[in-house]
Amino acid sequence: MLIDACNIRKVFNGRKDKQETVAISDLSLGIERNEFVAIVGPSGCGKSTFLLMVAGLEKPSAGTLTIEGLPIKGPGVHRSIVFQEYLLFPWRTVEGNIEFGPRMRKVSKDDCRAGSRDLIELMGLKGFEDCYPHELSGGMRQRVAIARALANKPEVLLMDEPFGALDALTRESMQLELQNIWLKTRCTVLFVTHSISEAVFLADRVVVMSKRPGIIKEEILIDLERPRTREMHTTKEFRDYEAHLEGIVWEEVN
Ligand SMILES: Nc1ncnc2c1ncn2[C@@H]1O[C@H](COP(=O)(O)OP(=O)(O)OP(=O)(O)O)[C@@H](O)[C@H]1O
């Protein structure tokens, strides 16, 4: 088991007169190395909170959370996170954004450049190396954000609704690109999404969280062959997975 969450509880303390919020009550989840796991669940059930804990940016109030058997005590270079908002440095070019992490880790200039050139190629950003984020479309910005995350050669890629702000067509092509990248790099991916179809399309396993305070309600293995294709969306197998998951999530919302 690469990541092991055992009986995690997370309570946020309210400001002065506000009550505390139990975001996650008792969550246990194991993630194997190289696995692609999607997390779905109703709004506010603690999905992002769990991802932030795995990133080391939030701490559990109770329970244990380990990576390779060691407690997660803070952020680590081998865990990269991509958010829905692209969070690029506006004053850096595409290349500058991608090279930021390796530069901070004192990787040589030549190696930084070689690494970013590969990622620019992989993410279809060729010709845009010298552009600033405001000169790019939303889809391209998110590609830069993913390239920047991959530049750190993460073992674990944490993605919080990364395609949520994109139009439907761009979103679909980004899903295909992400699958291609994952098939090439085989890093472990933990992917939060509101889209059940996206979860089924991308994941090896879909984890459904209950409404707040979150627990794991169900885990479904997605036994569809890879690489997955657009055409698969209309197959009976795919639709059955979607319908089953929609039923579970819907029970939680109502
Ligand atoms: N920093 C914080 N301080 C106080 N409460 C917080 C904080 N972060 C999250 N919460 C609360 O914890 C609960 C879970 O939030 P979280 O963002 O993890 O849910 P989510 O499942 O990712 O939601 P969504 O799908 O809408 O993005 C919510 O009730 C939220 O208001």
Image: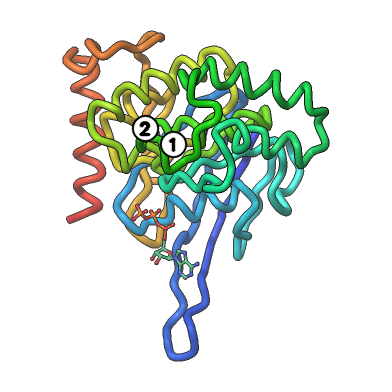
Q: Residue tagged by mark 1?
A: 141
Q: Give amino acid for label 2.
A: Gly
Q: Give amino acid for label 1.
A: Arg
**Can residue 160 be seen in this snapshot?**
yes
Q: Residue tagged by mark 2?
A: 139
Residue drawn at 47 percent across, 40 percent down: 133
Residue drawn at 47 percent across, 80 percent down: 14
Residue drawn at 57 percent across, 47 percent down: 91
Asked which secondary structure carries label 2, the reply is helix
Of the pair 132 and 17, the residue shown nearer to us: 132
Of the pair 61 and 152, the residue shown nearer to us: 152
**Compared with residue 170, is residue 229 higher up or lower down, i.e. above or below?**
above
Q: Are marks 2 and 1 in contact (CB under 8 Å)?
A: yes
**Can residue 1 be seen in this snapshot?**
no
Q: Quadrant of the C terminus?
A: bottom left
The x and y percentages for residue 128 are 49, 25
Residue drawn at 29 percent across, 52 percent down: 42
Horizontal side, residue 54 vs residue 210: left or right: right
Tell me the quarter of the picture where residue 66 sits: top right
The x and y percentages for residue 98 are 61, 33
C-alpha distance separating marks 2 and 1: 5 Å
* Number of marks present in the image shown: 2
